Image: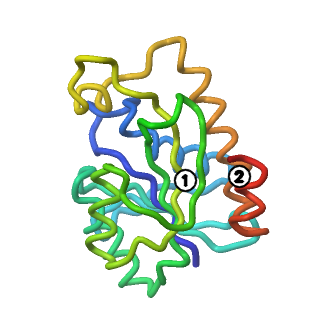
Amino acid sequence: MILIVGLGNPGRKYAGTRHNVGFDAVTALADAFGINLTGNELKGVSGRGVIGGKRVLLVQPQTFMNNSGECVRAFMDFYKIPPEDLLVLCDDISLEPGKLRLRTKGSAGGHNGLKSIIEHIGTSVFARLRIGVGEKPFGWDLADHVLAHFPKEQEPLIREALKTITEEVPLYLEQGAEAAMNKYN
């Protein structure tokens, strides 16, 4: 089983913010592949289904971004999922809005959700699909930027990125990271 985790913060207050684009990506996958996100277990909202011919477990951690690793580790332990079967979907301020970058390993790159996952599972060797949300404007606090909503002119870019994710993730699962990176990075 492949564990696909979208990072974000729980609650209506954070819905639609830059930091919750990982949640949005999991919702887009669930909608595209008929997976119900109705499970409430192990500190996360979850749903099971099939994407790209593989059994998947979609998860939106309910631990808040900075503690995402608690939820991810709980799912990995309970379902006996190794790091090579983990895919994390998250925001990235170093990418232009709507740009995607898939990697199979790497540092947290300043992302507290990824940092928490790396600390809890003990490795940085797992796939992550970063979704560009744009750099913070000069003089802004980083937290204010990532917890803000997208401006109207960026919303179509994010919608297109979420649609692309529903194509890229199946390709990644069917043909591997290299094929997905060659086509979408």
On the image, numbered disc 2 is attached to which residue?
A: 168
Q: Quadrant of the N terminus?
A: bottom right
**Identity of the residue drawn at 29% across and 60% down:** 115
Q: Residue at x 44, y 41 (%)?
A: 92
Q: Which residue is mark 1?
A: 129
Q: Quadrant of residue 143?
A: top left
- Amino acid type of the residue that numbered disc 1 sits on in the rendered structure: Leu
Q: What's the distance in space between the residues labelled 2 and 1, CA to CA?
A: 10 Å
The residue depicted at 51 percent of the width and 59 percent of the height is 128
- Nearest the camera: 119 or 82? 119
Q: Quick check: 28 above or below 173? A: above
In front of the other: 177 or 68: 177
Find numbered disc 2 in the image and state the secondary structure of the residue it sits on: helix
Q: Is residue 59 left or right of residue 148?
A: right
Q: Quadrant of residue 181?
A: bottom right
Q: Position of residue 61 (x, y in %)?
A: 34, 57
- Give the residue type that dot 2 points to: Glu
For this view, does 103 lie left or right of residue 5? right
- Measured as percent of width and height from the top left, residue 146 is found at 32, 32
